[in-house]
Structures are given as structure tokens and as C-alpha cells.
Image: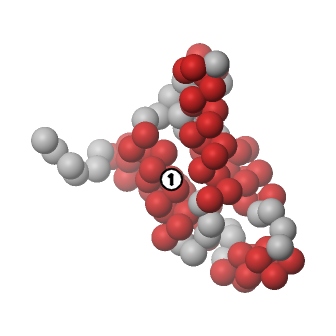
Amino acid sequence: MDFNLTEAQLQIREEIRRVCRDFPDSYWREVDRKKEYPEAFVRKLTDLGWLAALIPEEYGGSGLGVTEASMILEEINRSGGNATVCHAQMYTMGTLLRHG
């Protein structure tokens, strides 16, 4: 079994890194200090389609797999962000579409 990342997966990782660079540690400290939801960060990921990773293409999603979704969350956390705010949106929608 080959565990190397594909070119597409490497591209996903780099694109998420680019998004996260727009939200430096100071952004996350301010959100935490104010006890706010990181709306700008979530909106950016939503607008770029990353939170629709697990939604099939026929429903307007990206149709990516769990590996790619995990990579998105991992990269957000690696950058110093908080992927918790994205986790439920990504995984709940896929479950709802599959099971109603």
C-alpha cells in the first residue's frame, strides 16, 4: 500500500496553508480573547469550498474523501488555527447526505 500523498493532496495542503497565512496568531488570540466564533476564517474556508469537502459533487460539494478532509483539518491546526470550528460542518453534512 502506498502512503505517499498524491499531487492533488499536496496541492490541497498548500492551498490550506495559503488560506491560514491570512489568519495569523494575532487573529486567533483576538478571537480567543473576545470569546468569539472565528467567523471570518470559517467564511473564507466556506467561500473557497473547503468546508464542502465531504459533500458529493452532485450536491454542490467537492466530493473529496476522508483523507483529504483530515488533511484540511490537520493543516489548520498545524498553522496555529483552530480546526474544531470546521470539523462539525465538514463531517456532519456528509453524514446527513448519506443517512438523512
Q: Which of 61 and 77 is in front in this view?
A: 77
Quadrant that contains the C terminus? top right
Could you say which quadrant of the image residue 18 lies in? bottom right
Residue at image coords 73%, 60%: 41
Q: Where is residue 50 in the image (x, y as percent from the top left)?
A: 60, 44
- Rendered position, 33 above or below 37: below
Q: What element carries label 1?
A: helix
Q: Where is residue 39 in the image (x, y as percent from the top left)?
A: 81, 58
Q: Is residue 75 left or right of residue 35?
A: left
The colouring scheme, among rainbow, by chain, secondary structure or one colour, is secondary structure
- Rendered position, 18 above or below 1: below
- Rendered position, 73 above or below 47: below
- Rendered position, 55 above or below 27: above
Q: Is residue 18 visible?
A: no
Q: Residues within 10 Å of mark 1 (few under 14, many from 20)?
A: many
Residue at image coords 57%, 30%: 94
Q: In this view, does 66 lie to the left or right of 44?
A: left
Q: Is residue 48 left or right of residue 79?
A: right
Q: Position of residue 80 (x, y in %)?
A: 57, 75
The furthest residue to the left: 1
Quadrant that contains the N terminus? top left
* Circle 1: residue type: Ile
The furthest residue to the front: 99
> Residue at label 1?
72
Residue at image coords 55%, 63%: 76
Q: Can residue 2 be seen in this view?
A: yes
Q: Position of residue 24 (x, y in %)?
A: 66, 77
